[in-house]
Each structure stands twice: as C-alpha cells, then as structure tokens.
Amino acid sequence: MLNKPAGNNRYLKKLNQASIMELIRINGKLSRKELSELTGLSPTACGSITRKLIYDGFLHETGHGESTGGRKPVMLEIKPDSYYAVGFDIGMTQMQVAVADISGRILVEKNIEYKLGISVEEAVLLADKQLSEIIKERKLNRKKFLGCAFSVPGLVDRSTDKIVMAPNLSWNHVDLSTKAAEILKMPVYIENEAMCSAICEHWIGKCRNIGNFVCINVESGIGAGIFINGALFRGTGGCAGEIGHLVVDENGRACGCGNNGCLETYASVRHMLQRANERIREGYSSEYVEPEKPIEWNQLVKYAQKGDSMCLDILNDSAKFLGYAAAYIINTLNPEAVVIGKCFKQYSFLVIDVLTETAMKKALPYPASKAVIMVSDYGMNSSALGAAMIPIRKVFGK
Ligand SMILES: [Zn+2]
C-alpha cells in the first residue's frame, strides 16, 4: 500500500495552500476567481483554502478589483506584519541579525561584535538574547515567528543539518541546530552564508525575477551561492560555490587550502589587508598611510578612495581576479546575472568597472552578452536577510 490517504490529503492541502500563497506573492493581489483559474482548483476548494489562510492570518482581504461583469471581486493579499522570521549570520567577529515579516518587509537589521573564537553555545545564547531584545523593543509576539535560520561560513550536511566544517569559526562537526532549537524554541534552519545571500537576492534583492544567477560574497573568504532554474544549487556534497579556491595565478602566494594563487589570496578581505600591511612593513608610506603602522580594513578602503596608490592597487587587483572568476562562471553556467556582495559593496564604486571589463573580456562574447554584473544592495546584511527568508519561503512551498 502506498501512503495513507489522510497523509496524502494533508500533503495536497499544504501544497495547494503554498501554491495559492506563492501566486498571491508573485501577483501582489488576486481575487478568489483568479486563484481558481490559475490553480485549476474548483471555486469551492479555493474558497475553503483561502478562508483557512485568512483565519490563520497569512492573507487578508484588501479592496475590490476590476469587474468582468457583475460584482467587483474582493482582492486577497499577503497580510504584512502577521508572521515573522529571524536570521543570524555568524561571522568571525560579528553577528548580523535581521528580522523580516512574511511579506518580505525588513523590520530590523543589527550588527553585534564579539571577540574571535565564539563557541556554538555562545552563538546560540547571543542569538536568543538579541531576539528577545528585538521582540521586547518592537513589541512583537514570539509565537508569530515562523522560525529562525543561522547563516554560517562553512559546509552544512543537509541530511543531518549539522555543520561539517566552518574553518573561520574553528567549528567542526557541530550540531548548532539542536542546541538552537532547545534555546530559541522555534524551528531552526542552518545554511551556508553565500547560499543565504543568494536566497536574499532571489527573494527580495536584485534577482527576484531571475532563475539563473550567481551571488559572490567577498569577506574573510570568498564563496558563491548558485541559483539554477529558480532553485538553489548545492551540488552533490552541499559545497557548490567554493569559488574562493579557483586558481587564478599558479605562481601566486600559498593559500590555506594547499594550492597557490587561489582567488582568495587576491580578493578576500583577509588577504587584501595582509598584502597592504606587508607593503607597509617593507617601508611603504604615503600622504595617508603612516610609516610602519599597520592599517585596518576600513582604512584600506578609505585611503584608496582618497587616492592612495598602494591601497587602490590592491583593490584593483582584487577586482581583476574577481572578474576572472565572474568570466569562468559566465562561461560555465551561462547565468543571467552575477551579483557581488557583502564587503564588496563598500568599495564597489572604486573598482566595479575593472571587474566588469575583465569579466566581459575574459568570458566568451555570447554568454557574456547575456549576463549582467551587479553589486548587491544589501552589503554585509545579505546573509542574515537571506537566512530570515528561509522560514518565510517554506510558507510559499520553497
Ligand atoms: Zn585555496
């Protein structure tokens, strides 16, 4: 015997609810008649599902649409502020927190700094503390949270939801999910940070209507989130998108992975800063850079903007090699867009032309003519926002 009929009915009901929610999300507003036509469900079945969705607070009635003869139909739309979700992006020394409502509206974006070496327990307690504060400040109802998601700079095993490895956090084989569910008392999801950023771009960002795109995150490391035909592409082992270790210069400096001249060794924030401070140690100084005084990341960007040649060279080199990576992606996947995000947003205005020109020159002309290169609007918050969208997307069957 196959599945029990009751299980099948429940499954179908959920599926129908999700497709009605998704149709309304895409179209903004729809009448019951339009929903019936678009789903192929009978008007009675549509009426019963929308009644339940209104009762549960997912939808509400909002004015009347155009009449096609007879009475004007009542329109339905997603009810904003009815349900929420929270995303936590755990970095080496800071956590980004984002709360959004079911309509995709961003309610809160926060950044909390901490010392290097945060443990799983500390991260969970910090996340819970932040959420409790936000709930109190914004007078939200914790029961209205659909769930939370953690964005981590590492590899997540989808079958167990465990983090296999997150080298920058020194987390190996950790079960963040179970610990977080115990403390936060809501459904918990774990996702790789670049994949979270890609989810953000697809749900509320620049790739809302784009099925094939790649989102490159520039941070301490470099990673990519890949969407193919409107769905996240994880690869066989869940680690698709490790583009930070594309070799762009085999005579380049050693990378932590054991190879030489990986993209990260030119374009990650950590390596760019390392290069700048090496030059300073070797005696470089300028109108902006003081002799023998190490600089921080924000200074590197600031001095480059003011015209410091060494800082500008480092950012331009990084953009050139990111352009190589974008060209490889364009040739391999033929995407409609490549979005560069996180730290890149800070200095994109200085180097986006170098990146785009390199990518377009190195890629084959035909796939290059089909692709656009864009800078993410969300910068450092894209992974936390994408994480917040994960529990929300479940309502829409994603
Ligand atoms: Zn490497």
Image (cartoon, rainbow, N blue to C red):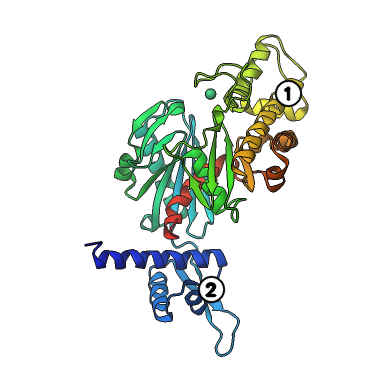
Q: Quadrant of the N terminus?
A: bottom left
- Does the residue tagged 2 have its C-beta within 8 Å of any atom of ligand 1? no
Which disc number belongs to residue 313?
Answer: 1
Residue shown at 68%/9% (left/top)? 282
Which type of secondary structure does the marked residue at label 2 adopt? strand
* Residue that mark 2 sits on: 30
Q: Is 384 displayed left or right of 12 in the figure?
A: right
Q: Amino acid at mark 2?
A: Leu
Rendering coords of residue 96 (x, y %): 50, 40
202 above or below 38?
above
Q: Is residue 294 visible?
A: no
Q: Is residue 73 visible?
A: yes
Residue shown at 72%/28% (left/top)? 316
Q: Amino acid at mark 1?
A: Asp
Front residue (pair 394, 297): 394
Front residue (pair 47, 133): 47
Front residue (pair 98, 269): 269
Around disc 2, counting alpha carbons within 10 Å, would you say few (fewer than 14), some (14 to 19), or many (20 or more)? many
Which disc number belongs to residue 164?
Answer: none
Name the residue furthest top.
282
340 above or below 66?
above
Q: CA distance from mark 1 to mark 2?
A: 53 Å
